[in-house]
């Protein structure tokens, strides 16, 4: 064993170039995998710490629970902490800002992560503590003891299992202000602002029979558990919206695990390691060729086969250990630099066991397999064969018809170069594969990320906006659809902005379709209550102006539009366009319907919210079906995917039956949707303004582009490192080929070939490697892109009816980019490899023995 160790070390030292190439290949692959693990893990660790600060550490937030369910939860063994409050409903200001009103409980506020920044707790039921964010949106100051007028709004289900709504005006005195971190609102699109008042049995805010329980709880698990939540949802037959995980916290906790398992991240790590494996295998074979005579001599003087195996295995272990140490060391420094550049300040990096174990195992497996294959080859050679073995290629190639063509086009040096790379086909194939792995990744991914049209066509959010560029609406969690208002002055102000082509105001509210369980499809049954009769299906009812209604004509599959010329003025029921289709998240399709049977002329019964002298109430209303919309309306226009069933009226009919006069949504068309100025101007208009929100194609595209840029950077890192590994491979192979053929090359020089022509021949060899690698990469990447386009187009056709949203095209630009870079790199590799040949004289070359 000692002799094997000494021989292994001595050979590695004597062959510094090849040893360095092995170590570099291993360390680069280890560094990449380590870095691609550590940076996301550190980002996740930072994000998790931030999430606990923003969202607190509770596991579930519940609401609308009865006394019995609330009391039972307190006795559950799987629940270790619970903080309960009484919910009065919501209080809504004149502009529609809706605040969730609960009884004051300091333990709840602490568990939820609130901080009292001003004032104190309420002492009676006409005093209130409000979230600072809500005051800002209501354009109120932080002055205490000011009186604020609200409308109390409480939705409930009565004893007949019918949806009802309770409203009444109420005045509160502000006695305290609570606060959440600002990032809480940025990172959580589902937040709901809250207020707290004193609860007493004599309170007259909301009738006692309409009160319910809200609160937060912790399971006896370390993190929020969806499995545990589903258990209690099933046990107590709760609505999933009334028993929700701490979304902000659980999303961050789950994000990294999901990210780690994506095909994209796995590919990014595996390709450099596979490329490194091909290099290592090639170099091991080159080393074996170099020392095959030495092995024969060692065997002839008595060294056993197992000692030869030990020597080669020890060599593998040494280069593996050194490669791992360098890889982890450089990876740590790169990760530190990467994290600090991302956050712009000094941050510690987080290194998990997985970050060390994963590259360790992959590198060990790759080196072990390569070592075993080479060792097996060495052990099969007898001492006599080994001593007789020459490094020269003995097999003479036959002249093929294409050799003449190559000679004619590329000259004698071109023909010789082509023949040379085919002398050892296995090394050539492995080298080409090594480079083409990087090329396939680069061409396929960068081609997609560079195509902005692809990003638009594959984004459901952008497609579903139709020809609308910007939508101004209100945050549904923090505003009440029946009170929010875009008045005439507000609309005129926006209409007069530069780059605004058209502003389309509309009224969009929720309502209920009155039907029975036998009339709806199986697809809709899973999304409704199990009641047989008096079934009330969630629906949307919308009022539009006549111009917009006219534009909906292209979606009408039967019946007529509801323009003035089609409406029967004597009809006692308002005429409506009906969308019976909805987007099913289970089937990922918009070809799903609510009612089994519906036809033009049918009379539908709907329950709508009406305003009677300032009080809201639900009222049954009959609607006549004038026209039926096709499935494309749901995902390609203003249809949206927020309701099962949709009734569209002209705005005058809507206002007449509901007495709701306020527009609560604006659809905007721009002259230039990419104009940054108009988007900034619109952002200023809605900032801190009653929870108004902007949805725009520009924002979606900007987000998609930012994500694609981030992914592009990750791809480029993998490609660059894989190319570096491949360059090492080419340098070693060309260098080995030169050394093996040094007497042959010296003979060519002796019979008159100049060193310049020999260099040309070697350069052409390297260019052939680059060309074949580029061709293979191009074929692989193009097929991959076609497969991806087919998958997206098929899904688009099934889900949103979009035909050929991605084009089938060959990524010419990316193929040329990769091809040029690869040729340059291969030529550089040749210059680095040919130095020894230039320095060697003809006589010295001819004296080298076989």
Image (cartoon, rainbow, N blue to C red):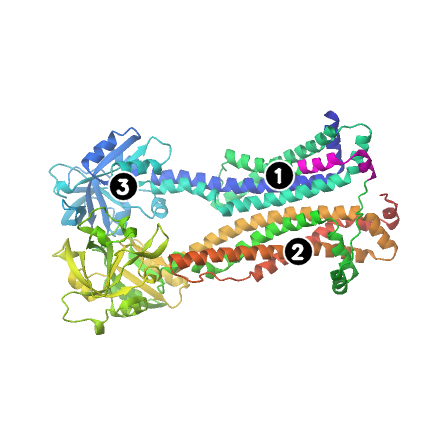
Q: Decide: marks 2, 3 in contact (CB < 8 A)? A: no
Distance from Cα at disc 2 to Cα at disc 1: 25 Å
**Label 2 vs 3, first from the N-terminus:** 3
Looking at the image, residue 118 lies above or below residue 837: above
- Residue bearing mark 2: 772
Residue 47: image location, x then y, percent? 42, 41
Q: Please give left or right for residue 480 compared with residue 811 in the image.
A: left
- Callout 3 crowding tier (Cα within 10 Å): few <14, some 14–19, many ≥20: many
Quadrant showing the C terminus:
top right
Which-is-in-front pick, marks 2 and 3? 2
* Residue at x 87% of width, y 50% of height: 842
Which residue matches tag 1?
366
Residue 178: assigned label: 3
* Quarter of the figure with residue 547: bottom left
Mark 2 Cα-neighbour bin, 10 Å: few <14, some 14–19, many ≥20: some
- Verify whether residue 635 appears in magenta: no
Residue 742 vs 697, above or below: the answer is above
Residue 558 rendering spot, x and y as whole percentages? 28, 67
Residue 247 drawn at (x, y percent): 34, 42
Which residue range is magenta in the image?
A: 372-388
Sooner in the amino-acid sequence: mark 2 or mark 1: 1
């Amino acid at each position: 064993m000692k002799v094997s160790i000494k021989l292994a070390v001595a050979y590695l030292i004597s062959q510094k170039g090849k040893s360095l190439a092995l170590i570099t290949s291993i360390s680069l692959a280890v560094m990449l995998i380590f870095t691609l693990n550590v940076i996301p893990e550190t980002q996740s660790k930072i994000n998790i710490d931030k999430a606990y600060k923003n969202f607190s550490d509770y596991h579930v937030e519940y609401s609308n629970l009865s006394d019995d369910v609330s009391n039972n939860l307190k006795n559950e063994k799987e629940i270790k902490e619970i903080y309960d409050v009484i919910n009065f409903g919501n209080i809504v200001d004149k502009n529609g800002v809706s605040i969730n009103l609960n009884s004051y409980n300091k333990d709840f506020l602490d568990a939820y992560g609130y901080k009292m920044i001003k004032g104190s707790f309420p002492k009676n039921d006409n005093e209130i503590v409000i979230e600072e964010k809500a005051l800002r949106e209501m354009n109120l100051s932080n002055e205490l003891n000011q009186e604020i007028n609200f409308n109390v709004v409480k939705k409930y289900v009565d004893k007949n299992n019918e949806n009802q709504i309770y409203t009444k005006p109420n005045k509160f005195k502000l006695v305290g202000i609570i606060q959440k971190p600002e990032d809480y609102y940025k990172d959580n699109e589902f937040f709901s602002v809250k207020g707290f008042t004193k609860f007493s049995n004599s309170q007259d805010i909301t009738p006692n029979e309409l009160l319910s329980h809200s609160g937060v709880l912790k399971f006896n698990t370390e993190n929020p558990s969806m499995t545990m939540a589903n258990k209690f949802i099933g046990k107590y037959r709760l609505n999933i919206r009334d028993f929700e995980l701490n979304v902000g916290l659980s999303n961050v906790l789950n994000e990294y695990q999901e990210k780690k398992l994506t095909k994209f991240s796995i590919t990014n790590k595996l390709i450099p390691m596979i490329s490194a494996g091909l290099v290592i295998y090639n170099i091991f074979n080159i080393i074996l060729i170099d020392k095959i005579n030495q092995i024969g001599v060692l065997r002839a003087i008595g060294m056993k086969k197992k000692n030869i195996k030990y020597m080669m295995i020890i060599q593998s272990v040494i280069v593996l250990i050194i490669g791992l140490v360098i890889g982890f060391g450089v990876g740590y420094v790169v990760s530190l630099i990467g994290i600090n550049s991302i956050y712009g300040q000094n941050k510690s990096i987080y290194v998990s066991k997985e970050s060390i174990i994963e590259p360790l195992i992959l590198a060990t497996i790759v080196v072990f397999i390569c070592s075993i294959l080479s060792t097996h080859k060495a052990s099969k050679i007898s001492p006599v064969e080994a001593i007789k073995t020459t490094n020269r290629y003995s097999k003479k190639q036959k002249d093929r018809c294409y050799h003449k063509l190559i000679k004619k086009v590329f000259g004698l040096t071109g023909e010789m170069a082509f023949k040379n790379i085919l002398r050892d086909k296995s090394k050539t194939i492995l080298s080409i594969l090594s480079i083409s792995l990087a090329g396939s990744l680069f061409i396929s991914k960068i081609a997609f990320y560079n195509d902005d049209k692809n990003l638009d066509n594959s984004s459901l959010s952008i497609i579903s906006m139709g020809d609308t560029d910007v939508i101004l609406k209100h945050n549904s969690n923090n505003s009440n659809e029946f009170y929010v208002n875009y008045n005439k002055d507000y609309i005129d102000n926006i209409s007069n902005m530069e780059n605004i082509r058209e502003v389309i105001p509309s009224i969009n509210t929720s309502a209920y379709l009155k039907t029975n369980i036998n009339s709806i499809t199986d697809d809709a049954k899973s999304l409704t209550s199990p009641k047989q009769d008096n079934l009330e299906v969630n629906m949307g009812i919308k009022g539009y102006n006549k111009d917009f209604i006219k534009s909906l004509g292209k979606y009408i599959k039967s019946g007529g539009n509801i323009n003035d010329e089609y409406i029967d003025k004597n009809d006692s029921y308002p005429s409506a366009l009906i969308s019976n289709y909805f987007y099913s998240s289970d089937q990922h399709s918009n070809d799903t319907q609510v009612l089994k049977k519906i036809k033009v002329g049918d009379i539908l019964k709907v329950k709508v919210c009406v305003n009677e002298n300032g009080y809201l109430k639900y009222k049954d209303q009959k609607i006549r079906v004038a026209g039926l919309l096709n499935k494309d309306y749901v995902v390609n226009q203003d249809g949206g995917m927020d309701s099962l069933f949709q009734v569209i009226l002209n705005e005058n009919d809507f206002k007449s039956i509901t007495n709701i006069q306020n527009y609560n949504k604006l659809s905007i068309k721009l002259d230039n949707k990419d104009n940054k100025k108009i988007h900034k101007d619109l952002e200023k208009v809605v900032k801190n303004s009653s929870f108004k929100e902007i949805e725009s194609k520009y924002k979606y595209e900007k987000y998609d582009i930012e994500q694609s840029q981030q992914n592009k950077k990750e791809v480029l890192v993998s490609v660059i490192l894989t190319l570096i590994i491949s360059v090492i491979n080419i340098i070693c192979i060309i260098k080995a080929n030169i050394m093996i053929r040094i007497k042959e090359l010296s003979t060519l020089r002796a019979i008159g070939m100049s060193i310049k022509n020999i260099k040309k021949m070697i350069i052409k060899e390297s260019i052939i490697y680059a060309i074949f690698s580029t061709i293979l990469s191009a074929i692989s990447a193009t097929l991959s892109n076609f497969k991806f386009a087919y998958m997206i187009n098929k899904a688009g056709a099934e889900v949103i009816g979009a035909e050929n949203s991605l084009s089938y095209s060959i990524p010419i630009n990316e193929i040329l980019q990769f091809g040029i870079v690869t040729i340059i790199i291969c030529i550089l590799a040749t210059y680095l490899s040919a130095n020894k040949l230039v320095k060697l004289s003809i006589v010295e070359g001819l004296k080298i023995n076989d």
